[in-house]
Image (spheres, grey):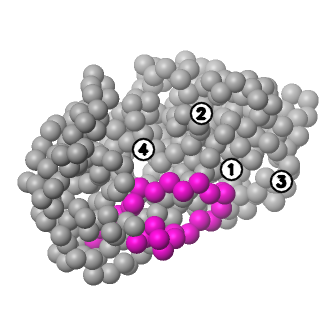
């Protein structure tokens, strides 16, 4: 059969968009791996922060909050942004960046909030609205919603060829051929590769490796510890079950898309930075993993039809914030794809700032 829409990529972006458009179109959701969400969605640091991604992303995150809270996907955590005296200008700039955005930020004494915090960390800003997010449950929710809406999910279907046929697209995959009127590029780190297969100008989506480690420490993570992030963007950590810590050096290493693995130097860097923040002793590195993040050149997501190819729709460049923005991003992208009035939850968001035409056509 010919589908109205073929979505390439069944991570959070593809799954949430499929769920949003299912009531209005026939959809096939194509995933290269044997399970959806393997490279990025399944390796998330799993927190929701309105300031994460900057002011250009914040409207999508804030608009997603009610749906995520209502669905039971969020759990109280709080984020504490910390700095040394030398970081005072960065702290002031951070507060100014979100002034008037509706995000509540409060200057606090970080020494009163993090037991064992080293004495030179004297500046703090509390973002109380930040939460844990149950990434697995959210992704499963969208996949289930899509299935109920009639979406066909096909796994082990890597894309090998794309051809423009009449007023639609013919896609050759490892699971066979699929035809559709609209091709949605939700392939994450592979988004530019998909575009090239389709004869569409790439927009410069770059993949980066991000490292995470799970630590056992002495003492263990204290009760009530918030997510702690350096204002300089060189570390963050948060408490997990059993007093464990999830830690990242906030690294971004450009890499080819693939099954990325953590590098020992990045794990060592993370621990070194952590030990310069708190006086806890690291007793064991229990887990280590790496995931992919993919960004457009201006670090904003890309939603909309390609200006150089009829029926080719971009849903990409969502960096590390694609999970926390999923409800609003899917609603906004669905309205653009279906050419419908936007849902009330995103009616105040300027979709034009995310349009692919901002990059011009370099074909």
Give the residue at x 49% y 20%. Answer: 350
Q: What are the residue bounds of the magenta stretch?
A: 244-268
Q: Which mark is residue 190?
A: 1
Instruction: Tell how many labels.
Output: 4
State how far apart marks 3 and 1 are (Cα): 12 Å
Expressed as whole percent of the image width and height from the top left, the position of residue 263 reads: 52, 70
User: Is residue 44 toward the left or the right of residue 128 in the image?
Assistant: right
Sequence-first disc among 1 and 4: 1
User: Is residue 21 toward the left or the right of residue 97 in the image?
Assistant: right
Q: Which mark is residue 160?
A: 3
Sequence-first disc among 2 and 3: 3
Q: Secondary structure at mark 1?
A: helix
Q: Quadrant of residue 127?
A: top left
Mark 1 Cα shell of 10 Å, populated few (<14), some (14-19), many (≥20): many
Does 178 appear in magenta?
A: no
Expressed as whole percent of the image width and height from the top left, the position of residue 215 reads: 32, 73
Expressed as whole percent of the image width and height from the top left, the position of residue 55 reads: 39, 31
In depth, the one of 140 and 39 nearer the eye is: 39
């Amino acid at each position: 059969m010919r589908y109205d829409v073929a979505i390439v990529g069944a991570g959070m972006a593809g799954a949430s968009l499929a769920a949003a458009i299912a009531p209005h179109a026939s959809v096939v959701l194509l995933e290269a791996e044997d399970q959806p969400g393997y490279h990025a969605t399944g390796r998330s640091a799993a927190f929701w922060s309105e300031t994460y991604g900057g002011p250009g992303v914040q409207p999508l995150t804030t608009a997603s909050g009610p749906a995520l809270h209502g669905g039971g996907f969020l759990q109280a955590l709080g984020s504490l942004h910390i700095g040394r005296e030398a970081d005072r200008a960065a702290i002031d700039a951070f507060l100014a960046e979100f002034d008037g955005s509706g995000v509540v930020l409060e200057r606090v004494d970080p020494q009163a909030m993090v037991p064992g915090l080293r004495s030179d960390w004297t500046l703090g800003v509390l973002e109380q609205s930040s939460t844990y997010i149950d990434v697995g449950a959210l992704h499963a929710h969208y996949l289930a919603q899509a299935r109920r809406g009639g979406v066909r999910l096909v796994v082990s279907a890597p894309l090998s060829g794309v051809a423009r046929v009449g007023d639609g697209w013919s896609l050759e995959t490892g699971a066979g051929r699929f035809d559709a009127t609209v091709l949605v590029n939700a392939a994450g780190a592979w988004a530019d590769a998909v575009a090239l297969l389709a004869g569409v100008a790439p927009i410069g989506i770059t993949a980066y490796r991000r490292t995470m480690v799970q630590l056992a420490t002495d003492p263990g993570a204290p009760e009530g510890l918030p997510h702690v992030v350096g204002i300089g963007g060189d570390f963050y950590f948060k408490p997990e079950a059993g007093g464990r810590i999830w830690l990242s050096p906030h690294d971004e290493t450009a890499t080819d898309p693939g099954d990325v693995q953590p590098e020992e130097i990045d794990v060592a860097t993370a621990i070194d930075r952590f030990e310069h923040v708190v006086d806890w002793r690291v007793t064991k590195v229990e887990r280590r993993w790496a995931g992919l993040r993919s960004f457009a050149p201006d670090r904003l997501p890309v939603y909309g039809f390609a200006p150089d190819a009829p029926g080719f729709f971009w849903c990409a460049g969502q960096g590390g914030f694609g999970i926390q923005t999923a409800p609003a991003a899917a609603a906004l992208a669905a309205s653009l794809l279906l050419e419908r009035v936007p849902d009330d939850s995103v009616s105040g968001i300027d979709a034009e700032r995310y349009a692919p035409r901002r990059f011009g056509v370099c074909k």
